[in-house]
Image (tube, helix red, strand yellow):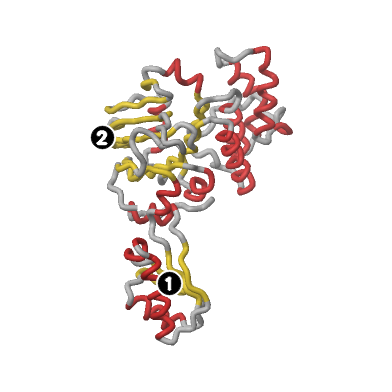
Amino acid sequence: MAAAPGTAASAAGGAASPAGAAVPAVIRTSGLTKRFRGGQLAVDGLDLTVPGGSVFGFLGPNGSGKTTTIRMLMGLIAPTSGAASVLGSPMPQSVSAVLPRVGALIEGPALYGFLSGRDNLVRFDAADPTADPRTRSRRVAEALDRVGLAAAAGKKARAYSLGMKQRLGLASALLRPRELLVLDEPTNGLDPQGMREIRALVREVAAEGTTVFLSSHLLDEIEQVCTHAAVMSRGRLVVQGTVAELAAGARGRLVVRTPDAAEAVRVLAAHGVADLRTTGDRVDGETPAEAAADPDALLPKLCAALVEAGVRVRSFGTERGSLEDAFVALTGEGFDVAG
């Protein structure tokens, strides 16, 4: 996607609703910057807009500034410069008013190892001055069941696996309905089945009307559950927009299946197809830029050129661009795409 660093793919004032009305931003930053002692610039002039009702993926490699940004949004550290608002209120000035409306899991859960999973949640709930103690037991039981820990509720937290601790931290964020749920790498330590369950839970929470802000270094995770995303690289915002926009901005790949792979490579290269790769009878390459503008004109010409050269074409088509393609095109960096 052709966007300069810091350029938003969607309007800065929020996403448009189906009816055309602007959706209020749940999180907004302007020039948000954090420089630590010693001169390390962790976040550099971040302009971010998170539409209400979205599942917003905050995407970037480890060390790209995601957690530092979240800590500023939650009032845990102060920015060096710039401004941030959460749920319409400035942060960190409005911490006491905003945080009761937010559920958060940041840098892993802080648990009491000597207490059971259930008693940890009782402690978390009791620390919330707005929580009704008369319904505490019900809230704790429902949260444990929701993250799949009901059977292990009586087990000491120090005996929990990393994945179980992550689930318990998520349960603490879900003790009460929240307007905003902030999750920092929520699937860390989980096996593939656990990842699928957490993704399903995120979708469920979003369907209930909660805006979800989810940071991850896993492209697959963002692509599967998020409606919107922002890409961070080395402390700077590279691009933001809907997931569909970001993926569509990446060039797709042309895929040909033929027993004449070597000849197909020669013909396609002569017609401007770059980054050609061969795997058995499959040849794929980066679709030429002009194909994105007018695929109905160029792609038939490429197929005809193959046939005219005597290449036996068994199948011919394109695969759409992915977030991985978009990230590499925008930053020139590789990425962890495990999911």
Please say if 323 is above or below 203: below
Which of marks 1 and 2 precedes in the sequence? 2
Q: Residue furthest right?
A: 151
Please report the residue visible at 58 percent of the width from the left and 21 percent of the height from the top: 124
Res 217 label = none
Q: How crowded is mark 1: few (under 14 residues within 10 Å), some or many (20 or more)?
A: some
Task: Write down the quadrant of residue 58 in the picture.
Answer: top left
Can residue 4 be seen in this snapshot?
Answer: yes
The residue pinned by badge 1 equals 277
Please say if 49 is above or below 179: below
Left or right of residue 22, residue 196 in this image: right
Please say if 155 is above or below 190: above
**Please, what is the three-letter code of the amino acid marked with disc 2?**
Gly
| Percent x, y of residue 234 | 33, 44
Please report the residue visible at 33 percent of the width from the left and 42 percent of the height from the top: 8
Left or right of residue 203, residue 312 in this image: left
| Percent x, y of residue 119 | 66, 22
The residue pinned by badge 2 equals 39
**Please, what is the three-letter code of the amino acid marked with disc 1?**
Arg
Q: Report the number of discs.
A: 2
| Percent x, y of residue 278 | 45, 74
Give the foreground label among 2 and 1.
1
Relative depth, front residue between 163 and 339: 339
| Percent x, y of residue 4 | 28, 47
Q: How crowded is mark 2: few (under 14 residues within 10 Å), some or many (20 or more)?
A: few
**How far, Cα to Cα, is label 2 from label 1?**
43 Å
